[in-house]
Amino acid sequence: MIPSLSIAALQASYRGGELTPTLLVESLLRRCADYPEYAIWISPPDAARLSERARELEERGMQALPLFGVPFAIKDNIDLAGVPTTAGCPEFARTPAESSTVVQRLLDAGAIALGKTNLDQFATGLNGTRSPYGACRNAFDPDYVSGGSSSGSAVAVALGLASFSLGTDTAGSGRVPAAFNNLVGFKPTCGLLSSHGVVPACRSLDTLSIFALSAADAQRVFAVALAEDTRDPFSRAAQPHGFDFGHAARFRFGVPAAKELEFQGDADARRMFGEAVERLRAMGGEAVEIDLGPFLEAARLLYEGPWVAERYQAIRGFFDAHAQALLPVTRRIVEGAARWSAADAFGAQYRLRELRRVCDQVWRAVDCVLTPTTSTIYTRAEMLAEPIARNSELGRYTNFMNLLDYAAVAVPAGLRGDGLPLGVTLFAPAHQDLPLLRLAERWLQRRGVPCGARETAPYVCDAPPPDPVRSGQVRIAVVGAHLAGMPLNPQLLERGARLHEVTRTAACYRLYALPDGRRPALVRVARGGAELECEVWEMPARELGDFAAGIAAPLGLGSVLLQSGATVPGFICEPLGLDGARDITDFGGWRAYRAAERPATA
């Protein structure tokens, strides 16, 4: 019996001796045989290869292997050494000598590559029906679409055949299949995961994606896969993520205006999105209505503009020689590149820049945005009857993300009345991947039900996932004129600071009013101290130098001990500055002192 396939649960079973990689592989091979009609695999799990890999891991042991014995599936436009890469087109197939950068990093961390999964041909589609290897079926109801193009990767995780899987995402392929199969679908900031060894769709927009049973598992995989790669010209280093709204007790999230929400008549989808908004509010979020119009206009550029020419460029040599090898619907899309000129491409880039400037204004008001992942879900028959129109509808809320350089995570929103899952998506600016994943994990724990179609119980790990990126934030303790609502508080706000907590200092300080009457002085004492009102603010580290330069003597920054025992930078006073100062410790804080003094000075 396989335990939960969550990474933490598997590793606990390995450590406890209840499971070995060999036992896991044997069990998964039997389970994979249960779903031949789902068209999950292009290169299915190979018993001999997997047994050899299991023995290798058992000889090495778990030490220093963060993904020891964790099984994963690979979308078949991503290279795995010795296994053909087809991109969903048999005539295109080639067998790589080495694995893609990301796959190799996962293997080096101890993961077990099961096989290569089905996809919409050349990653062109969001529905999962565009493959000569068969239409991949939904894990909850085989009459419905699985979502694409990373169809097989999502269904493999949903049916309990893998702990996680790799997909790619250009227009939503890492999120739509997650929504339709009750999974977490993480689309990182473009360029953070190397695309070396990946067949491109739109090379300037592509990113690898991760399907998982929890956001914590996605974060574990991300921590291993993350690395700048000189072999990928679009690779870039991760930047500090800034304010961690994923951990914050209070945060602001954008919600599209009601007139911009389209559900294609799906009453369940509309209800579930409304419930999702309320769930985020219950988690401490403040909903802020936003104008989704500019985002939707940007989305239309992807398939209604010259970016389709990049899909042609990705396979240009093969297409020019073997156009008839493509499925008719795929060929029709790629052939559309001929209508666009270089001037059109530049014009579209200019318009995208204009739209991005408008869209980015939303980040002045919110930390992240919540949208549906899709408007609804379709049967395979409905999709095949109108393949272009239905597919376009599935991308309404996803197509703009990579064009605008945002990070996103799709999470389950529940089940419709007919038992089919739908999801919602949280997105934020580039490099805010970790706050998104942390907020998604809080979402899942509050929701209290497992992901996937086969998992029987959610698994919550006590140990937090690894943190592969610095926040780039610093915390400052303030006790006087920089408190919220006080005269100097704007100096924090204009530098992007956020209130982290309202607390008190440790009982080892005394507070003085300086002779100018406008500022207090905090002084640490060996005896006779008291706990004093204190706020801890968080600001970007890059702003600290400028902020500190504006602090006038006798005040400066030092270390302040809080009631909790934590030490953070904060305002302290030079002893010489106390000449003529008034001891106001008994007031308990600067705010209370000022309130008491106000009638006397009015």
Image (cartoon, helix red, strand yellow):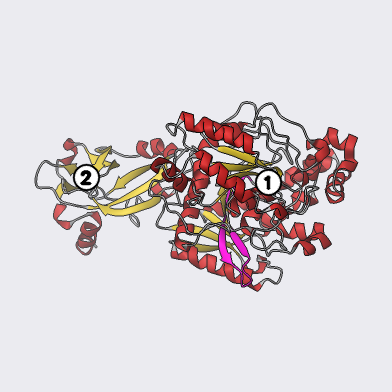
For disc 1, the marked residue is: 403
Side (left or right) of 354 relative to 320: left
Which residues make up the magenta segment?
405-424
Question: Given the image, on which type of amino acid does mark 1 rest?
Answer: Leu
Using the rendered view, name the quadrant where residue 521 is placed: top left
For disc 2, the marked residue is: 521
Please tell me which of labels 1 and 2 falls first in the chain.
Answer: 1
Residue appearing at x 66%, y 65% in the figure: 260
Main SS of the magenta segment?
Answer: strand
* Residue 11 x, y percent position in the rendering: 44, 43
Q: What element carries label 2?
A: strand
The answer to whether residue 386 is magenta is: no
Side (left or right) of 504 relative to 283: left
Q: Residue furthest left?
A: 527
From this view, report whether residue 74 is shown above or below residue 600.
Answer: above
Question: Given the image, on which type of amino acid does mark 2 rest?
Answer: Ala
* Residue 314 x, y percent position in the rendering: 78, 37
Dot 2: few (<14), some (14–19), or many (≥20) neighbours within 10 Å?
A: many
Frontmost residue, 8 versus 448: 8
Residue 236 shows in this picture: no
